[in-house]
Image (cartoon, rainbow, N blue to C red):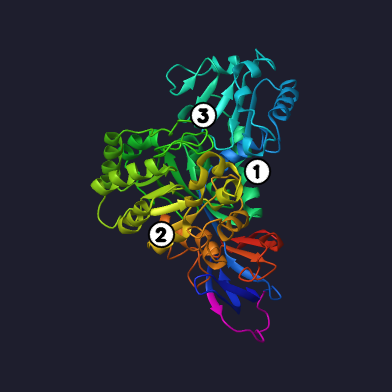
Amino acid sequence: MLKNAHCVDFAARKLRLCTLFIERDKIKAKLLHYGQLPKGIPHINLQGRYVIPGFTDAHSHLISRGIEMQRLDLSSCRSLDECLQKIGAYAKTNALVFASNWDENYWRHNEMKRLNRKTLDKISEKKPIIVRRVCGHYAAVNTAALRRIDKCWKIVDRKKGLLYEDVALNLNDIFIPTDKMLEKALTLATRKAINLGITSVHEISNPRRFRMLQKHRQYLKLRFAIYLIEKYHDSIVASGLRTGYGDDWLRFAGSKIFVDGSVGARTAALWRPYADTRRRGNILISARRLKRIVRSAEENGVQLMIHSIGDRSTRFVLEGLKKNLVRNNPLRHRIEHLELTTDKDIKDMGRLRIIASMQPNFVRRWQNPGSLYEKLLGQRYLRMNCFKSLLDSQAKVLFGSDCMPLGPLYGIGGAVRHPSICGRLDIADAFRLYTETASYATFEEARKGKIEPGYLADLVILDKNPLEEKNLHNLKIVSVMVGGNFVKS
């Protein structure tokens, strides 16, 4: 029992002092008063601290993040030379160099042209070296690594050692982590997520990782809804697997489809070119293939998670859904990222009832004036991540991180300080999209995301009132409860 807690209701934009009675993994009762409790009832006195529903990260690569935590991290580098120095030092003691998370937006100078096969060969011609950008859609490799990349992989510049899209995103299928590394990744990433107040994730995965989660199901401290990547879609349908199969800890949610790339890699599909090039990005799937997948999903009860960042890509997706979608979208298909949109796109999202699964941390990281998005898109950057406009269109909007970086409080800061009115949210709505509404995508809105009787006891305890705290850096996550048990205290 949690006594004298301030229970925060983001939908009503208010808080009430209450006592929560928790039985097993659910909230049994919520008393909106406090007073003398009967003797002998065990309780925890929160002394006026603030209780909110646990955060759901609605777009996660958590296990991949755990793998990266065991490899070389380049996120702190402020130049290409600093990256190369770290790679050189790491190569001295490791047979394989797999470095991740570099972001040229934080480099002092634009040195992208020097990042290529010949530059990496100077470090080593014998040991494979892979250097993948933070978005995952772009990587550079040396000659030794390039030899291990089969000719069947597309969008590979073998002369320069540059990898784009599918091959860059699936490098772990070529340079395969061990089972021990995967299990350690689950432990490391779970701990990190919980410390940030995350109690559920919508995880993009593959069958091997899904099997590992099933093996460790009884030991999970975090709830997983699994989306398997597109190449397994036909196998999913053939097996009879349907959206919602599983339980509160581990369930199959749907199929993940990539339709374009990322802004940082200049591969998100745009109507107008990027500011520094004539390139407009790429649509990675044919209209015929999209039609076949949508119809297959509709006929077999499989929800689709559709990656689309650019305005040209999103129009392509919406036109495909219009023609092939069951009315009112009962399977709750979702478009991921949806960063650059037109007014027509936003209107159609609401009309078709498509879920907009978005990442406010991208705003904070790349959408400030003078930052990456303005450099690559000019004034179009102000029309990106229009959370408010989408909410006004009656679209269902959810928040996740894409692990760039993990951290709901970090992302919420981007939503409330968005540079444009089309995206700027008040703090209650920003929190609500990271707590209450995320459960809608996985058909769990009647049991997750609220502090109400019958709902899962997945809770975050804060030291301050989140409805009044303008500087989110001042908010501290004191404790985290998942299924009635404290996993951080």
Q: Tell me the distance, in whole angstroms, between the alpha carbons under discs 2 and 3.
A: 31 Å
Q: Is 38 within the magenta?
A: yes
Q: Secondary structure at mark 3?
A: helix
Image quadrant for the N terminus?
Answer: bottom right
Q: Nearer the viewer, mark 3 or mark 1?
A: 3
The x, y position of residue 26, in whole percent, is 52, 67
Residue 402 lies in quadrant? top right
Whichever of labels 3 and 1 marks the residue nearer the N terminus, that label is 3
Residue 260 lies in quadrant? top left
Label 1 is placed on what type of residue?
A: Leu
How busy is the neighbourhood of tag 3: few (under 14 within 10 Å), some, or many (20 plus)? many
| Residue at position x 61%, y 45% in the image | 370
| Residue at position x 68%, y 35% in the image | 107
How busy is the neighbourhood of tag 2: few (under 14 within 10 Å), some, or many (20 plus)? many
Q: Nearer the viewer, mark 1 or mark 2?
A: 2
**Which residue matches tag 2?**
396
316 left or right, relative to 486: left
Magenta highlight range: 29-43
**Which residue matches tag 1?**
188
Up-down relation of residue 443 to residue 90 (above or below)? below
456 left or right, relative to 313: right
Q: Is 36 within the magenta?
A: yes
Residue 110 lies in quadrant? top right
Up-down relation of residue 478 to residue 225 (above or below)? below
**Which residue matches tag 3?**
168
How busy is the neighbourhood of tag 1: few (under 14 within 10 Å), some, or many (20 plus)? some
